[in-house]
């Protein structure tokens, strides 16, 4: 089994980011465009010192953040197989001093860290609601990544309510059709939606993803940012997307 797993592992460039490398395995999800859009949406300031990335996968978001900030970054991954990839991805980039990856259920974070610990929390969560009738993947690792089996929207905002500093930011990317669920859960947990950006596959096509930023105990006042188009009419990435890739 070990040899079989190693044959499926590859070391890829993390798009165009300063020779960053990431270890991936074809049995699991590879990092996607979502993992590039989110760290480019989150606002970083000189006062951003502690970042928490929940559902970190093989750590693409912490790796990209490392090129944007000197802040301490913690990535949380439940699944041991994916956690192992993340640990090694951080190590091959010599980023162990800035990025720490931990292998726990994210819901245990409220017991592990003090209240008001983080300036920024990011999350690329499972997109789909789950019940006993849900159609899921035969691969349980992929099921956990796609469906809210172990981690739900409410969990994210309960964690953010406790662990964010007052006025701190929680940013996530999700399906546009879950936007009402997201805002409802935010408000329930004293997270005020502050910025929203709708993502479109291309001009003339409905939005399929949304980026949203909420602040703990923030004042009311929501900004809808300009639309983000992923592809142009030639089905190539737009200039804005290429810049996010670090090109």
Image (cartoon, rainbow, N blue to C red):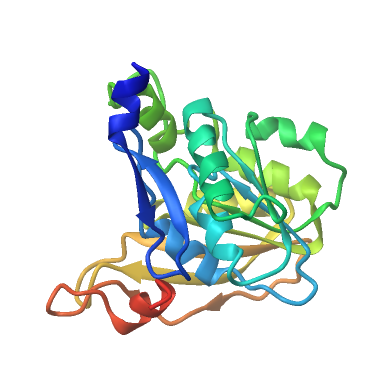
Q: Is residue 163 visible?
A: yes
Compared with residue 108, is residue 246 higher up or lower down, i.e. above or below?
below
Q: What residue appears at the point 80 percent right and 34 percent down from the top-left corner?
A: 112
Residue 245 figure quarter = bottom left
Q: Position of residue 77 (x, y in %)?
A: 57, 36
Q: Which quadrant would the C terminus be assigned to in this image? A: bottom left
Q: Is residue 159 left or right of residue 180?
A: right
Compared with residue 247, is residue 208 higher up or lower down, i.e. above or below?
above
Q: Is residue 179 left or right of residue 221?
A: left
Q: What residue appears at the point 77 percent right and 77 percent down from the top-left corner?
A: 46
Q: Position of residue 108 (x, y in %)?
A: 72, 30
Nearest the eye: 106 or 9:
9
Q: Position of residue 183 (x, y in %)?
A: 56, 56
Q: Is residue 104 left or right of residue 229?
A: right
Nearest the eye: 87 or 45:
87
Q: Is residue 149 visible?
A: no
Q: Position of residue 141 (x, y in %)?
A: 40, 27
Residue 122 figure quarter = bottom right
Nearest the eye: 62 or 34:
62
Q: What residue appears at the point 71 percent right and 68 percent down from the top-left corner?
A: 70
Q: Which quadrant would the N terminus be assigned to in this image? A: top left
Number of labels in the image equals 0
């Amino acid at each position: 089994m070990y040899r079989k797993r190693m044959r499926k592992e590859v070391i890829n460039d993390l798009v165009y980011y300063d020779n960053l490398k990431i270890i991936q395995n074809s049995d699991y999800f590879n990092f996607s465009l979502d993992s590039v859009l989110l760290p480019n949406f989150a606002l970083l300031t000189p006062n951003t010192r502690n970042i928490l990335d929940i559902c970190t996968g093989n750590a693409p978001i912490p790796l990209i953040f490392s090129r944007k900030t000197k802040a301490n970054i913690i990535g949380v991954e439940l699944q041991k197989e994916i956690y192992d990839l993340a640990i090694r991805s951080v190590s091959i980039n010599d980023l162990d001093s800035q990025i720490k990856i931990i292998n726990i259920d994210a819901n245990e974070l409220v017991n592990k860290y003090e209240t008001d610990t983080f300036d920024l929390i990011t999350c690329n969560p499972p997109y789909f609601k789950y019940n006993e009738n849900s159609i899921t993947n035969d691969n349980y690792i992929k099921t956990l990544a796609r469906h809210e089996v172990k981690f739900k929207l409410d969990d994210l905002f309960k964690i953010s309510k406790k662990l964010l500093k007052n006025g701190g930011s929680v940013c996530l990317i999700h399906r546009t059709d879950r936007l009402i669920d997201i805002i409802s859960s935010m408000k329930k947990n004293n997270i005020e939606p502050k910025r929203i950006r709708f993502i479109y596959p291309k001009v003339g096509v409905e939005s399929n993803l949304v980026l949203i930023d909420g602040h703990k105990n923030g004042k009311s006042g929501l900004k809808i940012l300009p639309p983000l188009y992923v592809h142009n009419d030639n089905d190539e990435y737009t200039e804005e997307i290429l810049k996010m890739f670090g090109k």
